[in-house]
Image: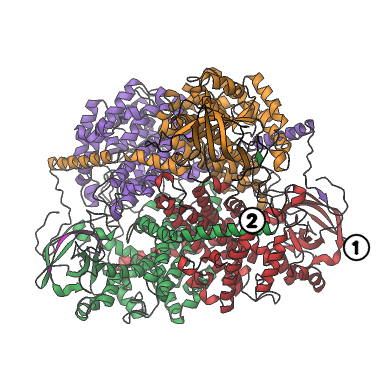
Chain colours: A red, B green, C orange, D purple
Amino acid sequence: MSELLVNSHNGHIKASDRVPAIARPFVSEKAMRTLDLVEKFVEEECIPADAVYLRQIGETTQQRFSSHPAVIEDLKTKAKKLGLWNMFLPKNHFKEGAGFSNLEYGLMAEYLGKSRVASEATNCAAPDTGNMEVLAKYGNEQQKRKWLDPLLNGEIRSAFLMTEPQVASSDATNIELSIRRDGDHYVLNGQKWWSSGAGDPRCKIYIVLGKTDPNNKDKYKQQSVILVPHDTPGITIHRMLSVFGYDDAPHGHGHLSFNNVRVPATNMVLGEGRGFEIIQGRLGPGRIHHAMRSIGQAEKALEWFLARINDPRKKPFGEMLHKHGIMLERVARSRIEIDSARLAVLNAAIKIDESDAKGALKEIAEVKVLVPEVNLTVIDRAIQAYGGAGVAQDTPLANMYATGRTMRIVDGPDEVHLLQLGRNENKRGPAHMNRIEAQKRKGNELCKKYGISLTDPLHLNRKSGEASKL
Amino acid sequence: MSELLVNSHNGHIKASDRVPAIARPFVSEKAMRTLDLVEKFVEEECIPADAVYLRQIGETTQQRFSSHPAVIEDLKTKAKKLGLWNMFLPKNHFKEGAGFSNLEYGLMAEYLGKSRVASEATNCAAPDTGNMEVLAKYGNEQQKRKWLDPLLNGEIRSAFLMTEPQVASSDATNIELSIRRDGDHYVLNGQKWWSSGAGDPRCKIYIVLGKTDPNNKDKYKQQSVILVPHDTPGITIHRMLSVFGYDDAPHGHGHLSFNNVRVPATNMVLGEGRGFEIIQGRLGPGRIHHAMRSIGQAEKALEWFLARINDPRKKPFGEMLHKHGIMLERVARSRIEIDSARLAVLNAAIKIDESDAKGALKEIAEVKVLVPEVNLTVIDRAIQAYGGAGVAQDTPLANMYATGRTMRIVDGPDEVHLLQLGRNENKRGPAHMNRIEAQKRKGNELCKKYGISLTDPLHLNRKSGEASKL
Amino acid sequence: MSELLVNSHNGHIKASDRVPAIARPFVSEKAMRTLDLVEKFVEEECIPADAVYLRQIGETTQQRFSSHPAVIEDLKTKAKKLGLWNMFLPKNHFKEGAGFSNLEYGLMAEYLGKSRVASEATNCAAPDTGNMEVLAKYGNEQQKRKWLDPLLNGEIRSAFLMTEPQVASSDATNIELSIRRDGDHYVLNGQKWWSSGAGDPRCKIYIVLGKTDPNNKDKYKQQSVILVPHDTPGITIHRMLSVFGYDDAPHGHGHLSFNNVRVPATNMVLGEGRGFEIIQGRLGPGRIHHAMRSIGQAEKALEWFLARINDPRKKPFGEMLHKHGIMLERVARSRIEIDSARLAVLNAAIKIDESDAKGALKEIAEVKVLVPEVNLTVIDRAIQAYGGAGVAQDTPLANMYATGRTMRIVDGPDEVHLLQLGRNENKRGPAHMNRIEAQKRKGNELCKKYGISLTDPLHLNRKSGEASKL
Amino acid sequence: MSELLVNSHNGHIKASDRVPAIARPFVSEKAMRTLDLVEKFVEEECIPADAVYLRQIGETTQQRFSSHPAVIEDLKTKAKKLGLWNMFLPKNHFKEGAGFSNLEYGLMAEYLGKSRVASEATNCAAPDTGNMEVLAKYGNEQQKRKWLDPLLNGEIRSAFLMTEPQVASSDATNIELSIRRDGDHYVLNGQKWWSSGAGDPRCKIYIVLGKTDPNNKDKYKQQSVILVPHDTPGITIHRMLSVFGYDDAPHGHGHLSFNNVRVPATNMVLGEGRGFEIIQGRLGPGRIHHAMRSIGQAEKALEWFLARINDPRKKPFGEMLHKHGIMLERVARSRIEIDSARLAVLNAAIKIDESDAKGALKEIAEVKVLVPEVNLTVIDRAIQAYGGAGVAQDTPLANMYATGRTMRIVDGPDEVHLLQLGRNENKRGPAHMNRIEAQKRKGNELCKKYGISLTDPLHLNRKSGEASKL
């Protein structure tokens, strides 16, 4: 199978050798070896399996959301054997994982991002990863045994239900789904959409954000997170949302309603009013995972781009496309943009490793905005080089674009992150103003000291002949 | 003077605390301390002195290029006392410097970039830095004693004469100035421009690139580098070039001619035909210096931007500018762009530290293109926030823009770097094409294995009723 | 139904009142009235029918390409009654049309572009429009009666088969499909893809570009265009290509093969070797149609954008989105970009009206590049304002983006048009160089006349003291 | 002199033949002839004279602002003889002008924009043009005779004093200069800057905006416009502001103070409280003039760009620059952007001609934002093609960039126009929301009529088995 990895005299550079110089001190030997293994697994096993996966899903909507491709289970077996399992759980917070830091897993996630099936094959797929983190970090023992264990084993899947269609969910305080205490139970009423993963028949548990105390004056204490088994009466899956024209089956993005859905009070996570705290802890590392998978997608798009402009069968106006300077410029810009964006993600991962997601707020927000833009730009260039094949099913590019486009929206749209970043930076504004004015004053004093007049050479009192002061 | 640095309860974060997490393993304790000292020196001494410097230069062209501001010498004395001297000379190559790596000096150069005088005040100003590197690396003992020593001491200044007006100098093989051997001498004839620094009366030595062997079949062996004292007969300074209206006096960008200029043969550096080798070694670290100073300029522009939008006297439509979302978005984007660009430069500096400029070709080229674009974008946003003051002498922004704009041209225009980068990336093209095709083949085999037909659901032979194959 | 058009006191401005001032002299009274009728028909009849259309198509691939929605026939009946039929056929070239100029129809096409079904409902849908033009302009009487008449009546549909998967079709000289004369017949062998419209069961006729004389030294004489009934033996539809997940059923983008497909020699259009001439004539007006429909899509996207930011249910952070300056800036930029792009299209349409597509080469190329970029930018902004709903089926935006994206590829990718434009502009280069140099010479003479020295104030011969000349 | 215009067999196309097709109905025969005359005058007389002008100004600040180049008076004499005088005064409002519409003059202004001296040489230079409009439209007979007549004759020059350094002048209601009635006089106190033209010794009259009634509840009635002779006691010119490094001498941008400056009450224009009305009327046509001159600058930059890439002496890497695809792409994009921007300006001019500046608010705002961005982009590309010469005095590009950059600031910064445009567009928002919802309702009704279920194919009530409604 070595033809797939393209051996070194063909110019292939191993994943471990592509780790940026600046990141190396943060990567253990073990992580380096695992990284190469991940690359090999993705390139040789997963990417070829993508073709199978897409064809095994079925044709009608009912078919597409009632089973999942067999090839994925075979890959999971292989991945487990290779030790490529649960690499996402950061070693400084969880003993259940494979023992890597966020930075180390980030490097691996880049390669996982190159295949549709690789993240799931290694049990590193969203939204399970974030959900497992929630359960491991905030769940009690009973919750862990019942839901975390089968998730860690890849036996079931899960969904995180937060967004609602009727409000501006980009501001999570707008969430309305009602969670009302009723004796030993909680009763849920409301709607959710973009419930990603809810379409998969293996999805057994929903982690649901709603309001237990909608009138609490502290609007960050109104929310709670509660566990809801998928087959609790009162839940209806109304439809699956499409992303551009893709339904992302069997995973799917569900639009659900909750009609007097009743769950035991013990399903509450961490306690009433702790919902905001939980979702904030959940989002940090997940954004790094998404970002590094996006970097991987951008690299993949660039690889396809390069493949196209070196295709000897494609010679518009008598020359292969790589002879056209426009194409090389785009290749170069893509390389620059990907490389600098990757460094930003790795730096954010290190910040999380060194403290936690809260300590890396700025770095995460930067990455959240920067990476999807870079990814979409690179994919778009590759699409253009392919022409018709670029938008069609013959390349993975259009699908990657669609997925990549959602990254500017999910977990908070760009604008929310930009405003948060902008406001934080802006806090330094008055201090800068003061410093600049102090420097001007000192500059003026210095001028006096050196005997320099502050009056401009052109200083005329046109009539009276005497200069006046401003 | 602490009002200038703005102490911590005003939100000031020390330079050493702003080093990106990912870069910290590469920065020694000593460098950390020096970095804070550099910041303090720049903010408290140099920036106020900029105002003096600009006013001490004089008004007529003759005045402006016949002396240099006294304030600079006072700053040099202070800098030497503080141990802030020659930090640019990388410790792994030169014993003459202050003992820092390129990465460490890079971090300092960011702060030097915030002031017009700081680089010169610490003897870290271009083109002297690159020239000192050339002399230290390639000069013989006599050349070192005569020119390197006074340069290291900040007693004289120097110029590097490469670009020529009549050819496309972006391709250095086009350089035409003739260096002809004549007994114990070389005789130079030709023109040079953009001879930066040649306007300063302290500039005593020109390092000149020309052709000793214009007919050599290897076009990279035609060039030589030779030392020419500024007062050698036959040299004429015809004029100074302006940069967007600025003459950059007394430094200046000279247009010179060489008319039978005769220098001793011992002034040849390294030997005939070694010119290309020398200029390539010279450019790498210099590009990092430029890039980090540009990062510093971008940070300064952002600081001025923030100062303006928090100025209580400036309330268009009843609100300070920072209340306008458009402004905060621009602040946030600037922060994102600067931070990721900085990481790219630091990574390139580490690559140079770990091998040399040749080993960091890709990283340097990326930085060469990326950083000036980011810098100009950020400065332009700040200019716009200031309106009229932004383009005028009341802010440093327009001058920074002009200087920043040249960074897309000097040491090779963007396009040269983009094409070089693009060509290098493109070498991986055929390998990628082969791998993608191998993956497709394997995907098809897998489909067969899983019993999946490769024929599309819609496959019609409109008339004959039988399917045909592609 | 007047609630749909939103009457004037709600701010609705009639289509005829929105015609740019500069275009009015070119629009007849009749066209003005028809334009308002088109708007009314689109807004009140077609856009509501879009929802029906999408749901009537069916679910499996076989279903989706074996019938067409009934609602479309009802709309066609209505449109005919209103006199909204075949408006695309330019009055100065064809008597069969509705009697409008390209400019006038262009204004109408903008409104047609707002609905998925409107172009077809008025028999103004691609590729039939271009195909009808080909038949009307180049077909003989027999060909016209057999294929043009039913097309003009909207009884059948057609496809134009040009692009081939195995070559770089952006350069049409690469087309390979073989058309070989065999007695009274021609025999076709080869492949075609992006055969848009071939999926529709009503598509009865293919207009096929291929090579009758592949060895002709004039590479623009190798091609011919021939008419091929869809049910000729030897034709296989292998599959339908998707566009970002959308299959565009029942229209579709077919991948077909021709295996010894035999048609009567009388099906040749215009004569062997005239293929290039035909496709060039065909593309001009079609590009204007596409462009104006794209303008309409951009306007629609902006309308949806405006609707969203004024939705009182969507209040992130306590305020409707239109209170956020970022959003208003995007609205304003969209308005600017759409308006200037529209003017470019209208100007190109007038150029075609005044001569023909050849005389408007520059203007058409400009529009071909500019309009899709504007359209995609505006749609993307609207998507972002909607968040999840923007990429899903709840808005038309993602589908519009997918279609809009193909506009940068079809009828020649951007790059081909940019290079052609660039080359044409470049022809003026030497003349400009000469003029600039002549102006410099005259400037120097004038200086002499006014007694001004051309020597720079700073002109020093550092040693010898005498100035030398450059 | 015909070598300058480059005759037709060298590819030169006359100005009248370059008028966009869509604009022709608006251009009289006389205007067409004058347009060609303007082009000839600019290319053959003015551009060569630019070199003289720049050298005649002098070197020290005092020199530069105490005389004006003699060459300009010679050109004025020539222009008058050719009938090229005061073309800017629109024929439908003023009898004093040359009898052209705003559209017709706009076409001429494009050519005037190519030379530094052409606008002044034809008495069409800002700020005199706007000032003459103010006097002609709002001045009384005495004011007209005293100031308008010599301005129309080109005997004196004028300045418009509006912007103030201490406030956010982008919001004109912030203007603070006090105009206090005192018997038969008004007394002025305050500061002004960006008083463009105030540096010229021929500048005899200031048209000053200030506040006569700062406490008026209607903040648009607080302002008045008053005429102040330049030599009135109490006026001090403190300094001249630079634009990037250019001082724009002798014109200049003054920073002035008013200290009890006393003028006769008869100098009030139109009456107290009419200031806002006057400045709004003043800005419309002026923005068109600026915009068309900017279009001319962009064309000139493109001409220089084309000249460079066809310069046989400049061959980086063995080929002239026009052989590099990157360059041709930039040429093409420049052509596209200039052409569409020009159409936007011409359309705005027609809107003004058909009503007035108020009726063209949207179109003027669009142009105000669009044109400077296009102009700067094109100039920047040209600069990059020239490398060092691009930023220096050897090309006009850097100076054009500096001037062009101010166009994003003067007469209201981009952001003000964007917000105004955005707000106006946004008024349509609720109507669009209503229409879209009405269309959805009608779509649903239609679905029912056609017997289509609105329930999604995937609609599961996971446990209870019965579907529920949203």
Left or right: residue C376 compared with residue D2: right
Callout 1: SS: loop
* Above or below, B102 relative to B362: below
Residue of label 2: A51
Residue type at the position of mark 2: Ala
Q: Is residue B192 magenta?
A: yes
Callout 2: SS: helix
Asked if both marks, 2 and 1, belong to the same chain, the answer given is: yes
**On-image quarter of the C terminus of chain C:** bottom left
* Residue under the image location 57 percent in, 78 percent down: A28
* Above or below, B123 relative to C156: below
How many other residues sit within 10 Å of disc 2, few (<14), some (14-19) or many (≥20)?
many
Q: What stretch of residues is rendered in magenta?
A: B186-201
Residue of label 1: A183
Q: Is residue C203 magenta?
A: no
* Residue D352 drawn at (x, y percent): 45, 28
Left or right: residue B194 compared with residue B468: left
Which label sits in the foreground, 2 or 1? Answer: 2
Q: Nearer the viewer, residue A103 or C275?
A: C275
* Above or below, C244 relative to B21: above
Q: Chain of mark 1?
A: A
* Above or below, C161 relative to D388: above
Q: Quadrant of residue C65?
A: top right
* Residue D467 drawn at (x, y percent): 85, 47
Say which mark, if any, is on residue D296.
none
Outermost residue toward the front? Answer: C183
